[in-house]
Amino acid sequence: MPYRRSTLSKFIIEEQRKLSGGSELIALVNDIQTACKYIAVAVAKGPLAGTRGSTGNINVQGEEQKPLDMISNDIMLKCCEWGGYLAGMASEEMDEPYAIPDIYPRGRYLLVFDPLDGSSNLDVNVTVGTIFSVLRAPEGVTDPQVADFLQPGTAQVCAGYALYGPTAMIVLTLGTGVHGFTLDPDIGAYILTHPNLSIAPDTHEFAVNASNQRFWEPPVKRYVEECVAGKSGDREKDFNMRWIASMVAEVHRILMRGGLFMYPKDTKDPKRPGRLRLLYEANPMAMLIEQAGGAASTGRGRILEVKPEALHQRVPVILGSRNEVARLERYHAEYDRGEDQPFSSPLFNERSLYRNATA
């Protein structure tokens, strides 16, 4: 029966008891789930709420802001600022960290988040979500500056995402595995429905934006070509390719049935070594993937070990089934050492997908 299942609130209390953790993190996660409920309602109303289209503003990332981006950002700030558990917050939609108003007490945690990942999909009613990461504030810091947020992913104490799709869900880790909770609209609570999620080490499914192939490095072209070649190629098995353009949806699919997600390094914008933000996209998703038995890499190292240098720093992201991630890391290493075979692919020829049979 549904009432016999654990709610998210009950689950995090029991987990913190096992870890001998304090009550502040429990209360903070409860505030985060409250914010996600409000955002889920706002997303579900869609055009009925008059929030589609654009604000006409460009955020610090150089991306067009949607009305729901700003609404979701404000919801997260207002739901989490008052409780006395946070020293500060940082968001994709804000240039600088958010200072906790003076009327509220300060706590020992930092919250970084992407309020509405995949918002470019809102107008076509595709799944979007919220990504969040919790860090400890440096000892004695009550007015954190940018440098205080620049902690590697290994320092995270909690990470997760909310999913707004056919059902609303929260998937999170406290460092003891990954668990999924589905929002029951009848009682307004997230119920544990997917305990102890795990990712198979092998897969036959990968997700990448193939429109960027001309900008990829040779190791990524090599990998994708092998997958596309299927049973007739070196991999000797067929692969399926997916692409939703919503990181939350991509990672959720991997946690549910395995797979690989890539937003690799490319040359499309030489100023950006990657496309996804380290602190509030790559790090929390990497923690979830690793806790579920997968792997997360830049192609040249573990994402969680990258030392952040800027609040909105971008990195390449390759994550999912660990054997596929390991293969891509090997291809990058061979390329960097000059040991890989010369790469010539009919799939990525400039003129055609097919070579001339008489060539």
Image: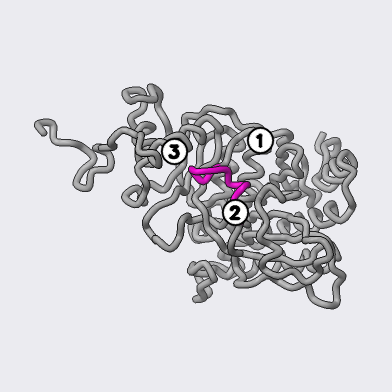
- Mark 3 Cα within 10 Å, few/some/many (few <14, many 20+)? some
Q: From the viewer's perspective, tell me whether residue 159 is left or right of residue 240.
A: right
For label 3, the SS is helix
* Span highlighted in magenta in the image: 297-307
CA separation, marks 3 and 2? 25 Å
Q: Nearer the viewer, residue 2 or 313?
A: 313
- Mark 1 Cα within 10 Å, few/some/many (few <14, many 20+)? many
* Residue placed under numbered mark 2 in the picture: 281
The amino acid type found where label 3 is placed reads: Ala
Q: Residue furthest left?
A: 358
The quarter holding residue 171 reads top right
Up-down relation of residue 302 to residue 312 (above or below): above
The quarter holding residue 44 reads bottom right
User: Which residue is located at x 83 percent, y 77 percent?
Assistant: 102
CA separation, marks 2 and 1? 17 Å
The magenta stretch spans residue 261? no
Tag in front: 3 or 2: 3
User: Which residue is located at x 18 percent, y 36 percent?
Assistant: 355
| Place of residue 16 in the rendered image (x, y in percent of width and height, measured from the top left) | 86, 44
* Residue placed under numbered mark 1 in the picture: 292
Contact between marks 3 and 1 (CB within 8 A): the answer is: no
